[in-house]
Amino acid sequence: MTSQAKNFILSLVVAIAIVLIPSQYFPLAQLSVIEQRVMALFVFAAMLWVLEPIPIYATSILIIVLELLTISTSGINVLIDNQGDHFGELIAYKDIMGTFASPIILLFLGGFFLAMASTKYRLDQGLAKVLLKPFGTRPKMIMLGLMIITAVFSMFMSNTATTAMMLAILAPVLTCFDEKDPGRIAFALSIPFAANIGGIGTPIGTPPNALALKYLTGENNIGFGEWMAFGVPFVIVLLAVAWFLLLKFFPPKAEHLALEIKGKFMTSRKAIIVYVTFGLTILLWLFDFVHGMNSYTVAMIPVAVFLAFGIITKEDLKKMSWDVLWLVSGGIALGLGLEKSGLAAHLVNSIPFDQYAPVLIVAMAAILATIMANFMSNTATANLLLPIITAVGVSVMSLEALGGAKMLILATTLAASLGMSLPISTPPNALAHATGMIESRHMSKVGVTLAIVGLVLIGILMYVLNKVNFL
C-alpha cells in the first residue's frame, strides 16, 4: 500500500470516528448531528490538504460532493431524515452548488483571462523590457528591478504564472554569474519571494485575498481600490525587506550584468485590444467608487471582450488553471457549511475569548495562519481559518477597539501569504526550487526571517488602519 493510500485511509478513518462518537463526548454542549458531520468534513479536508494523498483541488470537489450527500436538502434520504431536536438544519443544496459560480470564482476567472491574454500577446515581456531598462547593469539594482516587475505582475496575474514567466526572463541572467557566486541564489530566490509578496497587493493577487472578500461584506466591505490603498504600501515595504535580506544573506560578487529580454509589444489589432482592455480593467478596479461597479462585475469585462474578439480561444480555455477555481470553490463550500450549520459560531462561543487580550487574539490568529501556510497552500489555510476567524471577530466585543472582524480577517489573510519558507509552501517556491539553483535551507533562511518581519509589519499596518478609521 502506498503512502498516499495510507494517508487517505487515515484521514477517512478519523472523519468517520468523529461522526460515530456520541455527541456528549465532545467539549461542545448540545452539538447537533449536522454540526458533527460538518466537523468531520472539516477535519477530513484539513488532513487531505496537509497530507495531500490526492490533489488539493480533488479534495475540494470531494468536500462539495460529501456536503451535498450528508448535510444538504438533496442528500441521501437515510442521512437527512430529521432525527429529533438535535439533528440541526440542513443546508439548501443550491447554496452548496452555487459555490461553483460564486462571485469570487468569477473574479479569478477574469484574472486568468487577463494573464493568458497578456502572455499570448507579449504584454508581459514588453512591459518587463521597458520597466527594467532604468535599473542599469549593477546586480543589486537589476535584482530590485526584477522583484518590482514580478510583484507588479503578480498583483494582477497568477503568482505561479508570473514566476514561470520571470524565471524564463531570469535564465540568461544567471548564466552571467560564476557558479560559486552567492548572487545566483539571491536572484533565483528573488522571483518567488517577489511573486508571493506582490500577490498581497490586490484582491485578485492571491486566492486568500479573494476568499477574504467573501467575509468582508456589508459594513466590512472593502473595494478594489481600498484594498490597494493599504496592500500596495505593505507590498513595497515587505519587498524592500526581502531585497535587503537576499543581498545580506547571498551578496553577489559580480559587479555588472547584461540583462537581455527577448520580445516586444505587438501591433496587431488583437494585441491592441488586449492592451486597452488590460489597462481599462485595472482602471475600473481602481476607481470602483466612481462608476459603482464592484470588482466581480469588472472582472467579467475582459472575459466577454477576449472571447468575443477571438483573443482567447477554445484551446486557450483548455490551458487555464481550472483546478485553482475548484480549489477555491471547495474552500467556499467548507466555509458555507461551517457558517450555515452553526458550527463556527458554536466553536467560537465555547472558547472564552473575552478572557484574552484583543492583541493576543490577533497575534495568535496571524501566527497560526503563517505556520499553517508553510506546510499547506495559503488557499487551504484561508479556507480553514477564515470562517472561524470571522465568527470570532463578530462575537468578541473586545476586538471592536482594534477594528473588530474586519481587522482580524485582514490580519489573518495577510499572514497566510507569509508562509514561504519551504519549497512546498507555494507554487512559486516550488518552481524556483526546480531550477536547481537553490536548496531548501536557502529558502528557509530568508523565508523564516521574512515571515517574522512580515508579522510585525502586519501589526503595525493594523494599528495604522485603525487609527485612520479604515477599520
Image (cartoon, rainbow, N blue to C red):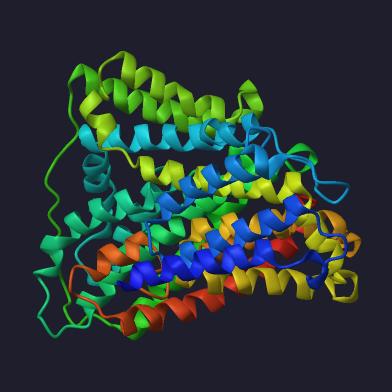
Residue pictured at 67% horizontal, 59% vertical:
39
Instruction: Determine the residue located farthest toward the top in the rendered image.
Output: 308
- What residue do we see at 24% from left, 23% from top? 313
Q: Is residue 127 left or right of residue 113?
A: left
- Residue 180 in percent (x, y) is at 13, 85
Q: Is residue 126 visible?
A: yes
Examine the rendered structure and indicate whether residue 144 appears above or below residue 345: below
In this image, 82 relative to 420: left or right? right
Residue 41 in which image quadrant: bottom right
Q: Quadrant of the N terminus?
A: bottom left
Give above or below for 310 relative to 467: above
Instruction: Tell me which corner region of the image, top left, top right, bottom left or bottom right, holds residue 7.
Output: bottom left
Residue 463's place in the image compared with 201, above or below, is below
Q: Percent from the top left, x then y, of residue 244?
A: 41, 76
- Which residue shows up at 14% across the image and 69% down it? 174
* Most foreground residue, 65 or 437: 65
Residue 10 placed where, x, y %?
48, 71
- Up the image or down, 417 lies above or below 275; here it is below
- The quarter of the picture where residue 353 lies is bottom right
